[in-house]
Amino acid sequence: MKVVEAIAEILKREGVEVLSAYPTTPIIDAAAAAGIRPLICRQERVGVGIADGYTRTTNGRRIGVFAMQYGPGAENAFAGVATAYSDSVPMLLLPHQLAPFYRATAPRSYMGWGKSHALGTGLGLIIGAKLVAPEKFCVNFMGDAAFGMTGLDFETAVRCGIPITTIVLNNSAMAIERHALVVSHDRYRARDIGGNYAEIGRAMGGYAERVEKPAEIVPALERARKLNADGQPVLLEFITSEEIAFSHRRAL
């Protein structure tokens, strides 16, 4: 028996029926295999809130459990943990470690995943980069899962007049978790997420369009660059398949 399987078995024996979680952590699949329903949230603070509310509603008779990635995941959970602690609400948190790296092709030309960068960090980074280098075409790439973390701050760029381009890669799933969320997805569709991010971008006051064909990519980027030069923030939603290859590994 693996350690995560033992943990899941202990949770099951203790009466845990629901596990709120944000990937990547192997406890999600182990819990699903043990008959515990995983509830995948879009941001760690919400996941902690689910566990908190679960405990509060039962007056502590049933303890909420939240699983997340170690490091940036735990950092994102701090506010929710502080809320529970201040109100003396018991709950159980289960972190798990993860740290990919990428190489830049020129000095300061790439900003992104490092030792402790949380999902969605790139949006803030690119806004800051545009402030100090307004002459550059500053582009932020994020997946649909990352949008759930920080995507609403595209409105910050709109409101503050910071003309960046954000590209949302939308495959309506957490595809990178295919190896980790097998049982939980088969039983509870744990990898599925959804949204029309171009519509959200327009609702926040920016220019936005949905790109569904490869031939549309270059023209969309050209329009984005021109609009940025004219002072308009742009959100491009690229509809993609569930790819699981790592571009940074192909580049090494």
Image: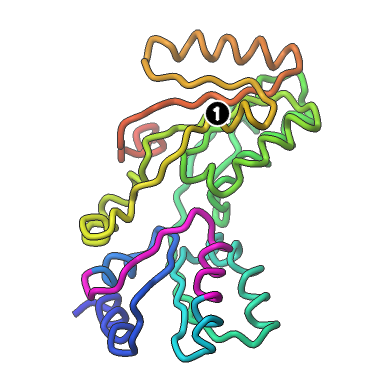
Inspect the magenta stretch and tell me whether residue 49 lies in it: yes
> Which residues are the magenta region?
33-53
For residue 207, what is the image quadrant? top right
Quadrant in which the N terminus is drawn: bottom left
Quadrant in which the C terminus is drawn: top left
92 vs 199, nearest the viewer: 199
Q: Which residue is mark 1?
A: 199
139 shown above or below 5: above
In the rendered image, residue 60, in percent from the top left (x then y), is placed at: 51, 89
In the rendered image, residue 164, in percent from the top left (x then y), is placed at: 67, 26
Whether residue 81 sits left or right of residue 192 in the image: it is right
In the rendered image, residue 242, in percent from the top left (x then y), is placed at: 30, 37
Mark 1 residue element: helix
18 vs 246, nearest the viewer: 18
Q: Residues within 10 Å of mark 1 (few under 14, many from 20)?
A: some
Q: Residue at x 45, y 32 (%)?
A: 169
203 shown above or below 146: above
Whether residue 233 sits left or right of residue 174 in the image: it is right
Inspect the magenta stretch and tell me whether residue 109 lies in it: no
Q: Residue at x 48, y 21 (%)?
A: 210
7 vs 55, nearest the viewer: 55
